Image (tube, helix red, strand yellow):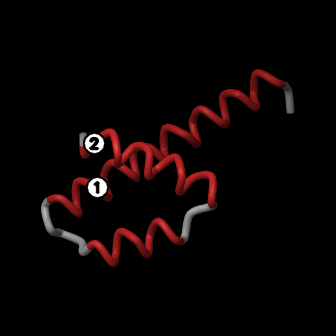
Amino acid sequence: MGDSQHRTECLLRWQALEQEARQKWADYRRKRITRRQLEDWLDQQSEMDERTIRGIYNELRG
């Protein structure tokens, strides 16, 4: 895998993760899912992804 292809795949993965995280947050804010369901989903993510997602949520809260 070339460097350019790797970057492209990382970017696509990040975009998909961000989109899913924002959708989960919207569902939570609209009370379509509970805080526990949101936390359970976060627990299923890798440690690095969870940190990133929590950063997104902190920005959305602010």
Most foreground residue, 57 or 26: 57
Q: Viewer-nearest of labels 1 and 2? A: 2
Residue 33, quarter of the rendered image: bottom left
**x and y percentages locating residue 59 in the rendered image:** 33, 39
Residue closest to the eye, 7 or 28: 28
According to the image, label 1 marks what residue? 25
* 47 relative to 37, above or below: above
From the top left corner, tell me how far across and down residue 50 is, in percent: 53, 57
Mark 2: secondary structure: helix
Question: Few, some or many C-alpha atoms within 10 Å of disc 1 (few <14, some 14-19, many ≥20)?
Answer: many
Q: Residue at x 35, y 46 (%)?
A: 58
On screen, 57 above or below 3?
below
Q: Are marks 1 and 2 in contact (CB under 8 Å)?
A: yes
Q: Going 55% across and 40% down the picture, which residue do you hit?
A: 14
The amino acid pointed to by label 2 is Leu
- Front one among 48 and 17: 48
Callout 1 secondary element: helix
Q: Residue at x 46, y 50 (%)?
A: 53
Total marks shown come to 2
Q: Residues within 10 Å of mark 2 (few under 14, many from 20)?
A: few
Which quarter of the figure has residue 37? bottom left
Q: Which residue is mark 2?
A: 60
Residue 38 % position (x, y)? 35, 69
Q: Amino acid at mark 1?
A: Trp
Left or right: residue 30 compared with residue 8: left
Q: Where 31 sits versus 48, above or below? A: below
In this picture, residue 55 sits left or right of residue 8: left
Based on the displayed image, in which of its 4 quarters is residue 41 positioned?
Answer: bottom left
Which of the two labelled residues, at mark 1 and mark 2, occupies the earlier sequence position? 1
Residue 52 horizontal/vertical position (percent): 52, 46
Up-down relation of residue 18 to residue 50 (above or below): above
Image quarter (top left, top right, bottom left or bottom right) of the N terminus = top right
